């Protein structure tokens, strides 16, 4: 295996928890992009009019409190992933109705496959685990940076918007996962 192939394989493996975003389905963009953008806009308007930016990004502020909550989630997402991966029910391995598709690489070849409920939920909970970890790490790092006064407002609002978008995306994907675990998984195709 040459260096380029090895690098490509390692990159593929490390980025695979984010493959949830590459699932192809006609309605998926609504869950992943439209609704999180809408909720981010609503949250931003409320925060802009009713909170100072210092209370949002300052010590003990909104982002810090939300990050403390998000820091507890990776363990739950990993537990859900383990449960789904080992769930002993045969119809979980049937193809989903109106099946979403995902691209995988198998023996160096790219192929599009239709998803089963098990694969969908595993990809979903892998994504949620990765996003929650990165959300906590990046927010802790950025909250501890010394930002020059000239750039504080712009960087604070930019960081707030990105944090809220990924938080809302994570919340909505979690709700979708809970729907599948709580109801759809037990409903016949």
Image (tube, rainbow, N blue to C red):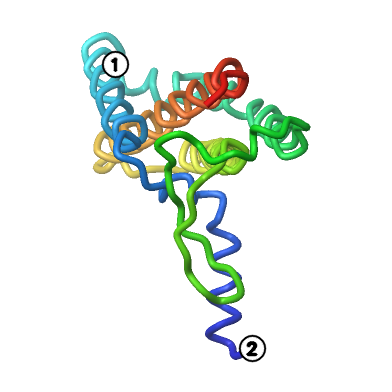
> Would residue 30 be found to the left or right of residue 13 on screen?
left
Pick the front one: 118 or 135: 118
In this figure, which residue is indicated by the disc labeled 1? 47
Q: Please state, as top left, top right, bottom left or bottom right, where the N terminus lies in the image.
A: bottom right
Mark closest to the chain's N terminus, 2 or 1? 2
Q: In which quadrant of the rendered view does residue 91 lie? A: top right
Frontmost of labels 2 and 1 is 2
Structural distance between the alpha carbons of marks 2 and 1:
52 Å
In this figure, which residue is indicated by the disc labeled 2? 1
What percent of the width, then of the height, locates residue 40? 30, 25
The residue drawn where x is 68% and y is 36% is 81
- Vertical relation: 42 (above or below) 101: above
Q: In which quadrant of the rendered view does residue 152 lie? A: top left
Secondary structure of the residue carrying numbered label 1: helix
- Vertical relation: 180 (above or below) 162: above
Secondary structure of the residue carrying numbered label 2: loop
Pick the front one: 138 or 123: 123
What percent of the width, then of the height, locates residue 174? 52, 25
> Would residue 151 be found to the left or right of residue 7 on screen?
left
Pick the front one: 89 or 21: 89
């Amino acid at each position: 295996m040459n260096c380029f192939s090895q690098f490509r394989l390692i990159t593929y493996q490390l980025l695979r928890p984010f493959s949830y975003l590459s699932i192809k389905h006609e309605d998926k963009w609504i869950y992943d992009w439209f609704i999180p953008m809408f909720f981010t806009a609503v949250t931003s308007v409320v925060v802009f009019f009713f909170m100072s930016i210092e209370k949002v990004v300052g010590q003990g502020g909104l982002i810090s409190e939300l990050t403390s909550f998000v820091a507890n989630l990776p363990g739950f997402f990993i537990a859900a992933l383990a449960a789904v991966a080992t769930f002993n029910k045969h119809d979980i391995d049937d193809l989903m109705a109106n099946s979403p598709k995902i691209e995988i690489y198998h023996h160096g070849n790219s192929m599009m496959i239709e998803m089963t409920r098990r694969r969908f939920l595993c990809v979903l909970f892998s994504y949620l685990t990765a996003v929650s970890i990165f959300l906590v790490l990046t927010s802790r790092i950025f909250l501890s940076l010394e930002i020059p006064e000239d750039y504080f407002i712009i960087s604070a609002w930019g960081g707030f918007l990105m944090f809220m978008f990924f938080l809302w995306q994570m919340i909505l994907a979690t709700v979708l996962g809970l729907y599948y675990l709580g109801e759809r998984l037990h409903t016949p195709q």
